[in-house]
Amino acid sequence: MPGWFKKAWYGLASLLSFSSFILIIVALALPHWLSGKILCQTGVDLVNATDPELVKFIGDIYYGLFRGCKVRQCGLGGRQSQFTIFPYLVKELNAGLHVTVLLLLFLALALALVSTGFAILNMIQVPYRAVNGPGGICLWNVLAGGVVALAIASFMTAVKFHDLTGRIANFQEKLFRFVVVEEQYEESFWICVASASAHATNLAVVAISQIPLPEIKAKVEEATVTAEDILY
């Protein structure tokens, strides 16, 4: 059985891994990976709008990996519309990259559960195989954190180099053309960053758990025998 010191740190490691699992689920469910401002360029060109008038033609958009919302501002007031990524919109995007982000996050879910199991195993008993010990916990956390980081990088690539927001904003638009004027990452994106950070923190937690505690040795008093003791 591991000592109380290691049990405490392995317990913390299991909580961090499981929290990463929950965070990824939340990030997948919420449609708030990115938000932005979209300018109705067609409306601006029609009325030859100047800078003060551009505000009337700037709408909002936000989206996640499965759905989102868009508010069109083309001079006639805001018109809100909901949209889903699957099954039609994904064909207008870089479908391979978008599916890659999803697959990586689903893989990260499995790896987070495995790392949780390894931490619980080490909290309950000392594994016979070294690969199931602290080294195994570190390995699975490196894999899980790395996969989440790859998913984050893939999503950023889609946004920066494949005009993800622009393609979504102009999906099924036949009369109007929208231009992205502002983008910012939202809570779902940062939740994934927190998930990867949790696995990185686990590496430090496991390292701390291996610090040997100083042994407290009780002082043994030596018995002194005197001449009087011998007489008795």
Image (spheres, rainbow, N blue to C red):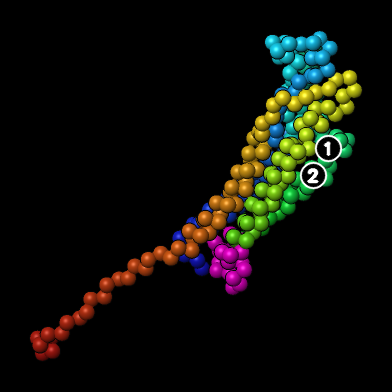
Q: Residues within 10 Å of mark 1 (few under 14, many from 20)?
A: many
Give the vertical position of 122 relative to 171 (above or below).
below
Q: Residue at x 15, y 85 (%)?
A: 225
Determine the secondary structure under disc 1. loop
The reply to whether callout 1 and callout 2 are in contact (CB within 8 Å) is yes
Residue 229, image quadrant: bottom left
Residue designated by label 2: 97
Is residue 206 shown left or right of residue 80? left
- Marks 1 and 2 sit apart, C-alpha to C-alpha, by 9 Å
Magenta segment's dominant SS is helix
Give the camera-side residue of 168 and 103. 168
What is the three-letter code of the residue carrying label 2? Leu
Is residue 18 shown left or right of residue 73? left
Residue designated by label 1: 93
What is the three-letter code of the residue carrying label 1? Leu
**First to last magenta residue range:** 118-136
Is residue 159 shown left or right of residue 19? right
Q: Residue at x 48, y 58 (%)?
A: 208
**Could you say where residue 70 lies in the image, as x and y percent from the top left?**
77, 25
